[in-house]
């Protein structure tokens, strides 16, 4: 009897198909890559999105401008506030609503707190993929202090629905800023510990240093934004380059790591976390008294003048953009959401994963901090 | 900063500022490729997104390309209109390879044909046979009621067989 | 019911493994439930990576049509006894996505559900409470959704096929193009 020889010339035997996700602990959220494998190495990666597709853009056309505020936080689950702020900023620009200074400061506080929470959640996921479960226990535990602050402020742990065209829904409760200040002190003490057990940890370093190198040109060409872009050496941050809210009144820097590998991507986020704490401390000191919201007339009759606008916010993953079109009705004519993970998750991954070993794939996915709900929408 | 707009206007195109950081350019369908190519050479290297607006009363689709310049800190919104009936436009994947994915999405949600895009297979939806869902003439509520049969009463639209419970 | 079944049910309720599958946004409340603050493992419940060794399938929120297919595959791969928890309003009546073209409305139609947790999103306390309730139900021999699925397989299958195996458009194509608000 003759057996089929198993050699290089026999393509069918060399390659096999492997589904990573949706039901896989190594992948972030409900998302899937179909990998064509040769031994341990990825030969081809095909993203398979749509598992979280809810048709937001269609649903938003059916609801009032203000009703949509309850819907949009669900687009990015780990960091819902950027959606609300970007959407409200768009409405305010088109309807020419002035936002009081105090409301702008409150928005910055909420955004930066959400950025810290998102970092803690993302790195704890990395702990899961590298078998470093201490980080999952510690970071998720610390994240809960932020969620408690949010709950006190807005009433919700995860989805806040706190922003409103013209400001925020309610003022800061009494004593909230003191508690925030306590939390920042606590966080300041925790950071050296994080550095010690995550960033100086030889296991994490061996798994991430030199993995998935992205050069500056490649990053721009492939539409990466946010920390992923900055880790490649392109220092561009919307908060600095095109300041919105009160970011131009605050003193902070954009840290520079610039190696472009997976380790520098998480390090970039870690250093930006330090800057977020700095921003929050300044906000506590500088926040003015005054109204927290400009009244919008009857929300059921609230019409946004004709026009279109692209409003964007720097989220912890990159540029979160809302392209909004109004035809002067009580409902939006069209809203297009640009999620920051879209280009890296659906396009760049097909190039970056090729040649990577299978055990590095979840690590790579977690260091880019991609969030499937924001591109599935 | 202002001269970029003058240059665009010199090309016989309509352009205007939306705010300090953003401007929009309105381009006829035939010239979209060359305008995007020109903007890319003028440091607008980041491709941020491709959107589409269904102007059903006019019978047109409006394609919106969002570009980013990292050197000038500017955002360019390039708009072009194509007919709604048999919408066809050339693919921009020669300028940005990345465009392929965005076009695939717009093909699925609006049914626009992108000439030159090799990959227009279904993307987010599976087994979709109806009108592309983001078109204005697609009724999502009727679709949902027809397919999922949910009712606001005590049965919740479930008519279980005798044996159940 | 023999004494032996009672003993088996008692032990089943003491070690339930939950499948590590995040189908929707509710998954974000699971890490706090699993880790130091709420510590799910107190109740003998721990995440498990493969469906074949898991007992609980937690549907965390809305199900897109594409996910429904994967969930059914997963559910059928699991070994009985198995229990399904519908998490959040979206599994009960579609929740905030009640008019969405890609999100199913009522999970009960496609796979049998033992417990629903209401809310968007339910707090970790609510999740733990439902686990305790499920444990009681299992120990009393009440949570028999998997048997229901076997008995009424044709009915469930017909419902699933209506959504997943469409052969013609759901809506009649309108010849005249009009805007629908």
Image (cartoon, coloured by chain):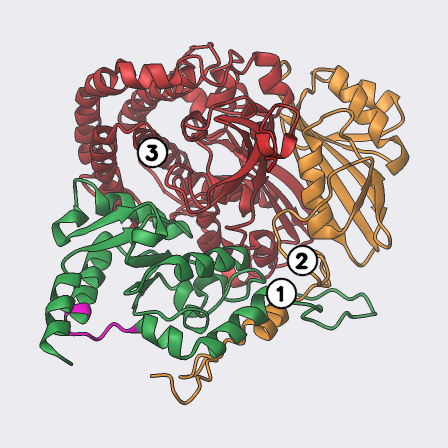
At label 3, counting other C-alpha atoms closer than 10 Å, the crowd grade (few under 14, some 14-19, many 20 or more) is many
Q: Residue at x 57, y 13 (%)?
A: A216
Which stretch appears magenta? C138-144
Q: CA distance from mark 3 to mark 1?
A: 36 Å
Of residues B20 and A297, the one nearer the viewer is B20
Q: Is residue C139 magenta?
A: yes
Q: Which of pointers 2 and 1 lies earlier in the amino acid sequence?
A: 2
Same subunit under labels 3 and 2? no
Whether label 2 touches label 1, CB < 8 Å: yes
For numbered disc 2, what is the local secondary structure? loop
In the rendered image, which residue does mark 3 sit on? A125
Which chain is indicated by disc 2?
B
Q: CA distance from mark 3 to mark 2?
A: 34 Å
Shade representing chain C: green
In the rendered image, which residue does mark 2 sit on? B133
At label 2, counting other C-alpha atoms closer than 10 Å, the crowd grade (few under 14, some 14-19, many 20 or more) is many
Residue B97 image offset from top left, x and y in percent: 71, 27
Q: Is residue A67 visible?
A: no
A160 above or below C99?
above
B139 above or below A324?
below
Residue A194 image offset from top left, x and y in percent: 23, 21
Shade representing chain A: red
Snapshot quadrant of residue C135: bottom left
């Amino acid at each position: 009897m003759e057996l089929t020889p198993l050699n290089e010339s026999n393509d069918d035997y060399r390659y096999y198909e492997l589904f990573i996700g949706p039901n896989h602990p190594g992948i972030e959220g409900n998302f899937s890559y179909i990998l064509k494998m040769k031994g341990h190495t990825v030969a081809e990666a095909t993203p398979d999105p749509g598992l979280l597709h809810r048709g937001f853009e269609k649903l938003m056309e059916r609801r009032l401008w203000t009703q949509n505020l309850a819907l949009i936080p669900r687009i990015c689950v780990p960091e819902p506030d950027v959606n609300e702020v970007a959407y409200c900023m768009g409405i305010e620009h088109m309807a020419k609503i002035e936002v009081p200074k105090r409301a702008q400061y409150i928005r910055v506080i909420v955004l930066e707190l959400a950025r810290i929470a998102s970092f803690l959640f993302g790195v704890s996921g990395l702990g899961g993929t590298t078998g470093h479960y201490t980080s999952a226990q510690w970071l998720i535990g610390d994240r809960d202090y932020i969620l408690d602050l949010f709950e006190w402020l807005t009433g919700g742990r995860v989805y806040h629905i706190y922003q409103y065209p013209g400001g925020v829904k309610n003022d800061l409760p009494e004593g909230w800023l003191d508690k925030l200040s306590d939390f920042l002190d606590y966080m300041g003490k925790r950071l050296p510990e994080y550095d010690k057990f995550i960033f100086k940890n030889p296991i994490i370093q061996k798994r991430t240093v030199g993995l998935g190198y992205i050069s500056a040109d490649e990053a721009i060409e492939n539409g990466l934004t946010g920390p992923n872009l900055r880790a490649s050496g392109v220092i561009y941050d919307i908060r600095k380059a095109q300041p919105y809210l009160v970011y131009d009144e605050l003193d902070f820097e954009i840290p520079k790591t610039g190696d472009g590998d997976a380790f520098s991507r998480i390090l970039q986020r870690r250093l930006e976390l330090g800057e977020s704490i700095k921003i929050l401390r300044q906000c506590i000191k500088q926040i003015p008294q005054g109204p927290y919201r400009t009244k919008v007339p009857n929300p059921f009759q609230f019409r946004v003048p004709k026009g279109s606008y692209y409003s964007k916010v720097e989220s912890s993953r990159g540029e979160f953009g809302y392209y909004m079109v109004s035809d002067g009705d009580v409902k939006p004519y069209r809203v297009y959401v640009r999620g920051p993970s879209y280009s890296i998750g659906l396009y760049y991954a097909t190039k970056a994963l090729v040649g990577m070993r299978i055990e590095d794939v979840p690590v790579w996915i977690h260091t880019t901090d991609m969030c499937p709900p924001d591109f599935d929408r | 900063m202002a001269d970029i707009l003058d240059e665009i206007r010199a090309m016989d195109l309509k352009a205007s500022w939306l705010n300090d950081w953003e401007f929009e350019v309105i381009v006829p369908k035939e010239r979209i490729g060359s305008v995007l190519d020109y903007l890319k050479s003028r440091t607008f290297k980041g491709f941020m997104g491709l959107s589409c607006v269904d102007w059903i009363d006019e019978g047109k689709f409006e394609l919106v390309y969002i570009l980013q310049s990292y050197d000038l800190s500017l955002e360019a919104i390039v708009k072009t209109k194509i007919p709604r009936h048999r919408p066809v436009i050339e693919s921009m994947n020669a300028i940005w390879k990345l465009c392929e994915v965005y076009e695939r999405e717009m093909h699925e949600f609006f049914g626009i044909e992108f000439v030159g895009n090799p990959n227009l297979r279904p993307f987010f939806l599976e087994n979709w046979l109806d009108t592309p869902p983001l078109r204005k003439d697609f009724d999502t509520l009727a679709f949902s009621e027809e397919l999922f049969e949910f009712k606001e009463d005590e049965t919740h639209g479930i008519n279980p067989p005798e044996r159940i419970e | 019911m023999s004494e032996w079944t009672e003993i088996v049910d008692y032990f089943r309720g003491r070690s339930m493994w939950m499948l590590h599958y995040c189908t929707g946004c509710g998954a974000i409340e699971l890490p706090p439930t699993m880790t130091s603050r709420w510590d799910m493992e107190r109740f003998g419940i721990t995440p498990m990576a493969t469906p074949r060794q898991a007992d609980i399938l937690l549907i965390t929120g809305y199900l897109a049509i594409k996910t429904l297919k994967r969930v059914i595959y997963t559910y059928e791969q699991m070994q009985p006894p198995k229990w399904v928890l519908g998490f959040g309003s979206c599994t009960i009546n579609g929740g905030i996505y009640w008019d969405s073209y890609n999100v199913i409305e009522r999970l009960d139609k496609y796979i049998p559900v033992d417990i629903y947790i209401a809310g968007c999103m339910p707090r970790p306390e609510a999740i733990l409470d439902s686990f305790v309730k499920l444990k009681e139900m299992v120990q009393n021999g009440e949570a028999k959704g998997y048997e229901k699925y076997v008995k009424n397989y044709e009915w469930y299958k017909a419902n699933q096929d209506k959504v997943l195996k469409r052969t013609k458009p759901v809506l009649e194509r309108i010849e005249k193009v009009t805007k629908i608000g």
